[in-house]
Image: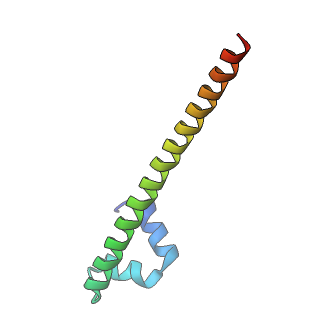
């Protein structure tokens, strides 16, 4: 008996018919739509990654500004 993978359980719970098609080797007829959806997800993933990087850069600049402001205040007190 072949073990059942967690991804198969997830696919079954999401859509039993799609799970059955996949288990029986039935290919979807909307290959171009699936490819377009994959491209959309890839673009979205890149934009999410880029926004995370920009957020880190912004936090770095904020930290730098706070350090410079602290140095400037300390230098005036001396």
> Which residue sits furthest top?
78
Give residue 24's quadrant in the image: bottom left
Query: As drawn, is 29 to the left or to the right of 51?
Result: left
- Give whichever of 39, 22 is nearer the camera: 39
Q: Residue at the spot x=53%, y=38% of the render?
A: 61
Query: As drawn, is 20 to the left or to the right of 57?
Result: left
* Residue 77: image location, x then y, percent: 73, 14
* Residue 76: image location, x then y, percent: 70, 17
Q: Residue at the spot x=48%, y=80% of the render?
A: 15
* Residue 6: image location, x then y, percent: 45, 60
- Give whichever of 1, 37 is nearer the camera: 37
Q: Residue at the spot x=47%, y=55% of the render?
A: 51
What quarter of the picture does the C terminus occupy? top right
| Marker count (numbered) | 0
Above or below: residue 8 compared with residue 33: above
Give residue 19's quadrant in the image: bottom left
What quarter of the picture does the N terminus occupy? bottom left
> Which residue sits furthest bottom?
29
> Which residue sits furthest right?
77
- Give whichever of 30, 13 is nearer the camera: 30
The answer to whether residue 54 is seen in the rendering is yes
* Residue 69: image location, x then y, percent: 64, 28
- Give whichever of 37, 24 is nearer the camera: 37
The answer to whether residue 27 is seen in the rendering is no
Q: Residue at the spot x=53%, y=44% of the render?
A: 58
């Amino acid at each position: 008996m072949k073990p059942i993978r967690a991804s198969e359980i997830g696919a079954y719970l999401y859509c039993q018919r799609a799970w059955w098609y996949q288990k029986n080797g039935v290919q979807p007829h909307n290959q171009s739509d699936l490819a377009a959806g994959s491209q959309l997800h890839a673009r979205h993933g890149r934009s999410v990654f880029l926004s995370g990087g920009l957020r880190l850069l912004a936090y770095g600049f904020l930290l730098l500004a706070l350090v410079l402001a602290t140095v400037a205040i300390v230098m005036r007190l001396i």
